[in-house]
Structures are given as structure tokens and as C-alpha cells.
Amino acid sequence: MAPTYTPHTAERSGDAAPAVDAFSTRPNEITMVPTRLGRLKVEMCGSGPPAVLWHSLFVDSTTWERVREPLSAVRRLILIDGPSHGGSPGPGRMFTLEECAGAAVDVLTHLGVDEPVDWIGNAWGGHVGLLFAAASPDRVRSLIAIGTPVQALSSAERPKITALVTLYRLTGPIRPLVTTVTNALLDRSSAAANPENARLVGDALRRAKRRGLYLAMRSVMLNRADSTDALTSLTIPTMFVKGADDPVWTVEQIQSSASLVPGVVCEVVPGGGHVAPLLDGASDLVELTTAFWAESMRKATQPAAV
């Protein structure tokens, strides 16, 4: 049985949590936050309303480096290294996407963030955002899911992914495996044309603790259930972003998902894999994101029709 967890409150002088405006103007900082999935590394930067950024499987928060500076000009960014990735050691066991969504609640509770957040999730982070919004709609102002197919692995995909997970368990991040993952996340041609992008993804993969990432691969990838039901419960402004050449999240799949979410916005940016939109499509993604946030805020503050 998974251990129970009582959310940890921030260690501050006095009993009252800080006001949201105090949080939004705090200095940049990096901290380790205790959650139901172990201590998670959380970095905060920028100023303004809070926005949570959760990365893809295999990598960490360094994949946001091309978009963080312009986004931090309009939001207080909360960048979370998911369990067993980056600076987050992980729980040492299998876990679920629902627990990841709960861990995000733990992070916000610890930080004293009471107002709704804008959520940006890349692949894994998009799945966590969907479940977070479905379970805690009062804590989410808007949702952007980048490279996030909601379908579970197909019968054709499962044997290939199982082989990848098994190889990683046996060998760790050897060069051929790192190349395979990098080509999948960025697209082979993009990885070849932009070696700095390939290096960023490969370095993040090699940083992860071997057993922790193995458990995360099984938990988040092999055991991921279909998330379609979560889509039907979304009532917040939502945007789906697809890499133009991403073969895993097809136009048909994104259209099928979009049909279940009232008022959803669908956009395509440069990039061939799930992570490529953050790198190859960074400038387009920033422009789309800031415009989406502005429009969402405008609609939220409009007087109700009589």
C-alpha cells in the first residue's frame, strides 16, 4: 500500500500563509518541496500571476530554457522537476499520474499559492495538468498541453516501448539509447540540425538516477491510462499545441481530443517530437502562450452578459 501523505506547510515565521501578491514578487529561488512523491526540486522566477511548468518524461526543467525568460516577464513561473527527474530523487517506487497531480497540489500548498495557476505541461506534464485541472478545477486558471496525446499506448507501440524500458533497466543511458530517445523527442532531422538541442535532451536523460527513471518510465509511459475522461470535465480555457512533424500526436488525434473540450484552441508550431516545440518552436510557442493568457484574462474579467 502506498504511504499516506499530509501536505507540508511552508516553514515561515507566523501562522498565516503569505498573500498571493507577496508570492508573485518574491526573488528568484530554487527549493526542495516535500510531497507525496518525495522531495521535488522547484524553481521560481519572474513576477506576476503564478504559472506551473511541468516537463516531459526523460528530461527536466532545463527544456524550458528557451521560453522561460519571455514567459517570466508576465508570470511568476513555478518550474517543477517531476519525480525521478532532474533534481527530484523520486519516491523509490511506482507511482501514478493522479499522484503527480496530487504532488503539484502539495507544491502549491507548500509555497502558499492560493490563487488559480496557469498550467503549461509538455507531454508528461500535459497529462498531469489534465488530471490536476479535472481534480482541482478551482486551482487552475488555464491549461496548455504541448505534445500530449491522451490515448494509452497502442498495441503497435507497446512492444517497442517495453523493449526500450527493458534496455534502459539493463544498460542505463548508453549512447545508442540516448540517441534513440533524443530522436524521438526532437525528431531525427531536428536533432541532427541542432546539436545543442540534442545535447540538452541527452544531458537531462543522463542526469536522472537510473532506478528512479526506470520506475518512472514504467509508471508514466507503460502504465499510462487513457485520459479522455479528463478532457470531458475541463471547463477552463485550454490550448493544445502540436509539433508540426510530431508523428505520435496526429492531427486526427488532436482534433478528436479537441472535440471534447468546449472552446479549446489548437495550434501547430515547428518541431518534430514532443519536446521539439519548446526548442525549435520556442518563439512561436511564447507568442501563442502570451496571447492565450491575455485573452483568457480578458474573458475572465469581462462583465457577465445580462
Image (cartoon, rainbow, N blue to C red):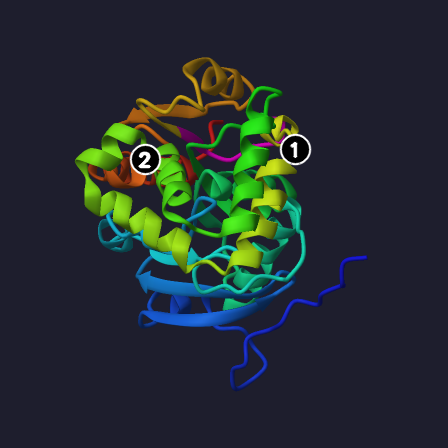
Considering depth in this image, is 56 or 16 the residue closer to the camera? Answer: 56
Considering depth in this image, is 31 or 176 the residue closer to the camera? Answer: 176
For the residue marked with disc 2, what is the amino acid? Answer: Leu
Q: Is residue 194 magenta?
A: no
Q: Determine which quarter of the picture holds residue 77.
A: bottom left
Residues in magenta?
A: 232-240
- Marking on residue 225: 1
**Vertical order, 273 against 141 (above or below):** above
Q: Secondary structure at mark 1?
A: loop
Look at mark 2 in the image and give the residue it sits on. Answer: 186
Q: Determine which quarter of the picture holds residue 271.
A: top left
Mark 1 vs mark 2: in front: 2
Q: Is residue 49 left or right of residue 255?
A: left
Q: Residue at x 43, y 39 (%)?
A: 300
Q: Position of residue 124 (x, y in %)?
A: 50, 42
Q: Residue at x 56, y 77 (%)?
A: 16
For the residue marked with disc 1, what is the amino acid? Answer: Ala
